Amino acid sequence: MSKAVPFLLALMLLYSLCAEAVVQSNSIGQDRDGFAQESEYTLSIQGDVSTLYHFGEPVWKRTMTPWEDGYEVSTFQFDEETTHYRLYGQDRLVAEELGSGVRYFYYDARGILEKTMVVGDGKVREMEIYTYDAATNSLNSLLLITEEGSSILYFGDPQVRPWFTYTKGDAFTKVMQISETLQVQEVWQGDSILKSVEVEMEESGGIRVKTVVNGLEQSELYNELGLLVLKTSPSLRTEYRYDDRTLLEEVEGNEEGKKRIIRYEGGNKVTESHYQDDILEKDVSFPAGSGKVETLYDKGKPYCDITYALDGERVLSIRYR
């Protein structure tokens, strides 16, 4: 038996005799007392029971219980009213509940994971087999076997150039880490490349994702907050404008001079304006609790209002100016 397990159980007994401790936390229940930032989460620790709260409301309760050569961890999710069980032995995860089945973990003599297996309804549903480089212990491959079929992932030397590949049906995907700021993904079917994806970090802290599908390229730019700010394709360019993290406008335009501006309030679309060569052709408003109203323009001047029902399809009235 590992010396760490009895020591851990002794600590659990000691904590059970102590008063409740409440610390700052995050959404996954880590102790964040060392961080200066305020947090929406707190973690209550009382003996072998930990409870995570979000704005004072319980998220989950985790209990550690001694079990043979290890211990059991049961986590109750308050929102789903379900309990998830995990078993640890020799300081390793050996089994966990997975829906109506159980996933078992198997390790080699070095303590490295070599296989997992999902069993349910008296049969094996899924199996994962891992292989490693004998010298570095870095992961070489992962074979996934399911009831629907199998796939295999291969991994490159992380010291030279990190990459991995995987198969799905008759498609073959390769992901390469070119540098700290550049990642490339390619999808092949036979000898034909179907899709390539290039991910690059911007100096501003944002991320640019370039995708080529069947020879057509599109690009998405995300700012340092992870918000999509620009999307381009051969036929369309769309800008997204925000107030802090709240979307205010989408501005679409193409090479033919067409432009559409969509405005939002509180996450709801409120107006939509259509232009041709910067000349307003149509305004659409979306009143709360009712359908939409279209105002048509001729050479920039309004001449007709069309009111639609709540379904946005049936015309209720047409008024000419």
Image: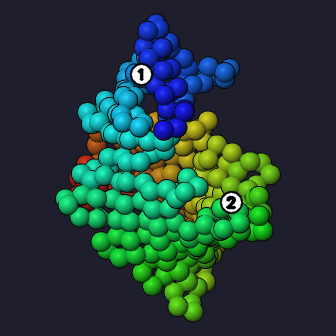
The answer to whether residue 261 is seen in the rendering is: no
Q: Residue at x 60, y 66 (%)?
A: 132
Q: Can you name the residue that lies furthest to the front here?
A: 1
Residue type indicated by callout 2: Arg
Q: How crowded is mark 1: few (under 14 residues within 10 Å), some or many (20 or more)?
A: some
Number of the front mark, 1 or 2: 1
Left or right, 214 with reference to 53: right
Residue shown at the point (31%, 74%) measured from the top left: 148
Displayed quadrant of residue 268 = top left
Within 10 Å of the Cα at label 2, are there few (<14), some (14-19), or many (20+) other Cα atoms?
some
Q: Is residue 223 visible?
A: yes
Residue at 48% x, 38% y is: 1
Q: Residue at x 52, y 26 (%)?
A: 7
Depth order, front residue of 293/82? 82
Residue matched to label 1: 48
Task: Indicate whether 81 appears above or below 105.
Answer: above
First along the sequence among labels 1 and 2: 1
Task: Pinpoint residue 49: horizontal percent, then vertical percent.
Answer: 40, 21
